[in-house]
Amino acid sequence: MLELALKGTKRYYGWVTGLLLVAGIGVVFWLWQLQFGLGITGMSRSVSWGFYIAQFTFLVGVAAGGLMVVLPYYLHNYKAFGRITILGEFLAISALVMCLLFIMVDLGQPNRMLNVLFYPTPHSMLFWDMIVLNGYLFLNIIVGWNVLEAERNNVPPPKWLKPFIYLSIPWAVGIHTVTAYLYCGLPGRGFWMTAILAPRFLASAFAAGPAFLVLLCMLIRKVTRFDPGKEQIQTLGKIITYAIIINVFFFLCEVFVAMYSQIPEHMDHLTYLFAGLHGHDTLVPFMWAAQLLMVTAILLLINPNARKNEPVLAVACVMVFIGTWLDKGLGMISGGFVPDPLHHVIEYTPTIPELIITAGVWAVGFLVLTALFKIAIGVKEEVMGEMG
Amino acid sequence: MESSSRRRFLKVAGISALGAGSIGAKPVLNAFAATGGGHGEEKPVIKMVPNKDSLMGTRWAMVIDTRKLTSAGDLEPMIEACHKVHNVPEMENKNHEIKWIWEEEFKHAFPGKINRYIEDEAVSHKPFLVLCNHCENPPCVQACPTKATFQREDGIVMMDFHRCIGCRFCMAACPFGARSFNFRDPRPFIEEAELNKKFPTRCKGVVEKCNFCAERLAVGQMPACVEASKGAMTFGDLDDPESEVRKLIRENFTIRRKQNLGTMPSVYYIV
Amino acid sequence: MQKKLYNKNVVIAGLIILAVLATFPFWYNHGKAAPAPKPELTEKAKAAKECIRSTAYMKTEHMQLLDAWRDTVVRDGIRTYVNEVGKEFDMSLSNTCLDCHSNKEKFCDVCHDYASVDPYCWDCHIENPKENE
């Protein structure tokens, strides 16, 4: 089926070339980073994780979000989603590729990466994260590819695939749970030390992933002959509505616990993010923007008439995606490091090279996504052609 | 004590066998076989053993008598001694700063113990020496995905710079901000004349921190900061009831940083 | 059924280019073998006559030995090496090996360059610059 990714219009090739260009520039800057060290980023002794790990965390969510199309179809026999499960799985694959790349560009000594395998350390959450992420990537490749191939050949998917499909459902929950465990088990980091971190990560994942998928579906309908379907998009819209409400609710629970208990280690981070601390307030506008976007999206989505209006739904989805990205991708990581454990307020801003490398990784992710979606839609169009 | 020394013997023997075996020589086991069986020629014995004059302990700890350290000038010799002997660079960019032992105000060294009514000059602006606590229950060791940071049998939390992949999970895990990351090659930031040729520098991309002077203990010396402190810092074995540190802890009121987190720091402060 | 090779010219040209690229190192370096290096000993090393083990052993096994040393020293805190005749050595690259072999360029590098290996030991361990000007 790979050949389907090679045949395309001029526009398709233009898009691919553009992505390759961005990825290439990213690689050049990454080589510079390899040679110089992570000193080209804005990270510091106090804020020792920055943009890379933030993107990683957010994208684990996008990958887990694929579950929201797989689960209704396979567990609840919701037939309409049969049309788009492949899109969810392929989106997960490209998000996971980005996750792994972000981990890689964040390492100080990437050439020693395999030490994680040579010296397996089960008491480290990073070890488990490596296992669940690679496992989920593997599951999605196996399941996605075989289901699509069966569809192309007009036969039911092979029976041996069933266990992999069922395994992938809890596994999706697993990837984001373990990713939350990276943070929430660390003593002395009050912002992350909350049992609700994993559920909160999942809620934002189940909003952001499907929101992105809705936008992709609309795009696909526009540029290809394949229509993912009105009903499908509407059902995703409902899922997003629930998930984003739960996400904001969880966030408010956090705010209550921290602000009502007034324990400084928990409260100070929220104060820093939303009001600034000791005159440091770089993130304040972004954090309020995130909340505003998510709340506005809720107001739009909660009204069935607005939600059923596709342009409105599209706007809401963009808001959800950007809002959760700011909330989790920007605030969650920086917020946990500021103030630092010694209560110094040292802020973090990414540097230009850091942003370029980040853009490069996103470009690679989109490249994978483009190729995979091209294949999937190619197959769908073929099948439609045979039937029509 | 007895059981621990036996354990150490067994461990050494095991390492000798393993280490020598892995480097191609016939290990201790063969030597035993040769003498026992009385047949075959005697094989050479190649061993790796602890230094004869090395200081041995099972729970190293430090007591800092802050009553004797009142000004930044008092702390300077200890910081300098440590940073010089360990080739700690002086980075230009504050973000890239590397420090093993440094000074903090009370409110930063002991956040959570802030009390505005004792905030007279003497306490609030008095510098406190802070360093890696070599916790009995170290969260950094738990977090490290490659065992590049690990706890030795004598309680020292060590870094294996050869193995560190630079993921910085340990830095997120440490509640004491004790760890520094080499954001770039540190060599250009160590004065050539200052370089201690007997101790390695680090390469870019690895995490580093205080090692309780493991390399000095191995040759029978006290940690560099303790030596430079003129009696304000004391180092010893907590498991030895007769040790100087135990005596100080017995006779003085001591506090440790963030005790409530349960990491059980090994650095005690007399205040 | 008839089998047909599509895009015959492109495929064959591609195969030829691949074959040329894959064998490039062989014909490019053909007949240009570099002479085997002769590492030089310092006066101190000459005077010592024998390294911590036999020359043949050191030649082939020094990397494994150093690898075992670094693990044993750093991770087990065991720092004394006793060789087959009972002589003791401090297990330290900087303080033992490079103390004698203080001429990195003429001792270490000549072979490493020849074998095209680039060990990063010296990124951290300071070469003893006794013979450096």
Image (spheres, coloured by chain):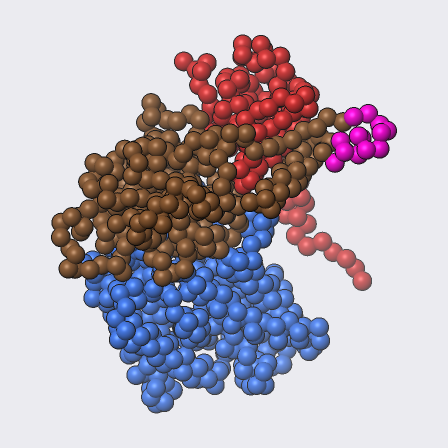
The x, y position of residue A287, in whole percent, is: 27, 67
A291 versus A9 height, above or below: below
| Residue nearest the viewer, comparing A138 with A364 | A138
Is-magenta flag for residue B179? no
Is-magenta flag for residue B37? yes
- Residue A55 seen: no
Q: In this view, does A160 lie to the left or right of B85?
A: right
* Quarter holding residue A239: bottom left
| Residue nearest the viewer, comparing A164 with B240 | B240
Q: In this view, does A4 lie to the left or right of B109?
A: right
| Residue nearest the viewer, comparing A148 with B12 | B12
Magenta part mainly helix, strand or loop? helix
Count of residue discs: 0
- Residue B161 seen: yes
Please report the residue visible at 43 percent of the width from the left and 63 percent of the height from the top: A185
The x, y position of residue A207, in whole percent, is: 41, 75
The x, y position of residue A360, in whole percent, is: 42, 53
A222 versus B54 height, above or below: below
* Quadrant the C terminus of chain A occupies: bottom right
Chain letter, brown? B
Q: Is residue A4 left or right of residue B256?
A: right
* Quadrant the N terminus of chain A occupies: bottom right
The x, y position of residue B96, in whole percent, is: 32, 43
Please report the residue visible at 64 percent of the width from the left and 71 percent of the height from the top: A164
Q: In this view, does B20 lie to the left or right of A375?
A: right
Magenta residues (range): B29-42
Q: Name, please, the residue furthest toward the bottom.
A: A305
Chain letter, blue? A
Chain letter, red? C
* Quarter holding residue C75: top right
Please report the residue visible at 25 percent of the width from the left and 59 percent of the height from the top: B113
